[in-house]
Amino acid sequence: MPDIRAITAADLTGLEPLLRASFGRDDFALSDELEAFAERQPGDWFALYSDQPGGFVRYFSLDKNLYIGELYVVPGPERTGRLERLLRHLVRHHTLPAPATLRLDTPETDHELMDVLQSLFPTALRKTVAHYQLRTPARVREISDVQTLTETDLKATQAILAQLKPYSVRELAGLAATKQLYIANDNGVKAALHAAPYGAGLEVVTLATAQAHLWRGYAAALLQTFLDANPSTEVFLKVNAENTAAVRLYENVGFTRQASQTEVWWYLRLDP
């Protein structure tokens, strides 16, 4: 019977092939995983082992009592059983505050995982939301300057992006140095965008506006600046299909829907 145990920092090297497969992009770096682990010191991230690692489950905070879960099991005939064991173990042994909700993102084609979730948690799955990947074709435009961020800018950017995803100031400084971070600066940071390599293109990972400056065009202007700064690159992003304002914004600047990349987001309630 495969063993499930808490992941330690020493385990990450052995888990690297699974982490890389789960990441799904070319910019995976084990050093980033080690740094993130050192910052968080998680006590209830779990991996399943037999002779070799067979899967893992972990999560990251998105908002108060809302977490995004990452679940990966190596393909094969034992995948269904391993998915069930990892999910049951997480529900029994997590230390998230109650009540907590775990969001699991699944490709629309992963019927195996969706069947497991519906079978194990028929009443705890609060809702599902379909998402679509959008893309914009390569463009030819004048390249805009990428702004240099000061320490004050970085701290303001951290607060803005924290609405969607936690970043450390150090992490943001690294993103700025590699031109993966953009800001809309109008007497202070009003919006911020993080983009990362995605195959041969780029993916917009996070785009957010300061709460006090919503609906003033900062996100749209920032997105356009980002696209202009990457004139010959395909750009991808994922958006909630129900977020019509965001979909309209993206389609207005040239993104088109890729229905084949539909995802389903499952919200699993973790009661005490």
Image (tube, rainbow, N blue to C red):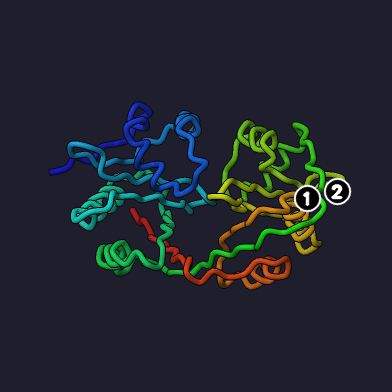
Numbered disc 1: secondary structure? strand
Tell me which residue sits at (43%, 69%) in the image. Answer: 128
Picture disc at residue 48: none
Amino acid carrying mark 2 in the image: Asp
Pick the front one: 89 or 256: 256
Quadrant containing the N terminus is top left
Give left or right: position of 38 versus 109.
right
Pick the front one: 141 or 186: 141
Pick the front one: 141 or 54: 141
- Residue 77 in the image: x percent, y percent? 19, 56
Amino acid carrying mark 1 in the image: Lys
As drawn, 104 above or below 131: above
As drawn, 154 above or below 234: above
Tell me which residue sits at (42%, 54%) in the image. Answer: 100
Q: Work out which residue is located at the far right of the displayed protein and give it.
A: 187
Dot 1 surroundings within 10 Å: few (below 14), some, or many (20 or more)?
Answer: many
Whether pointer 2 and pointer 1 mark residues with C-beta atoms closer than 8 Å, the reply is yes
- Tag 1 residue: 190
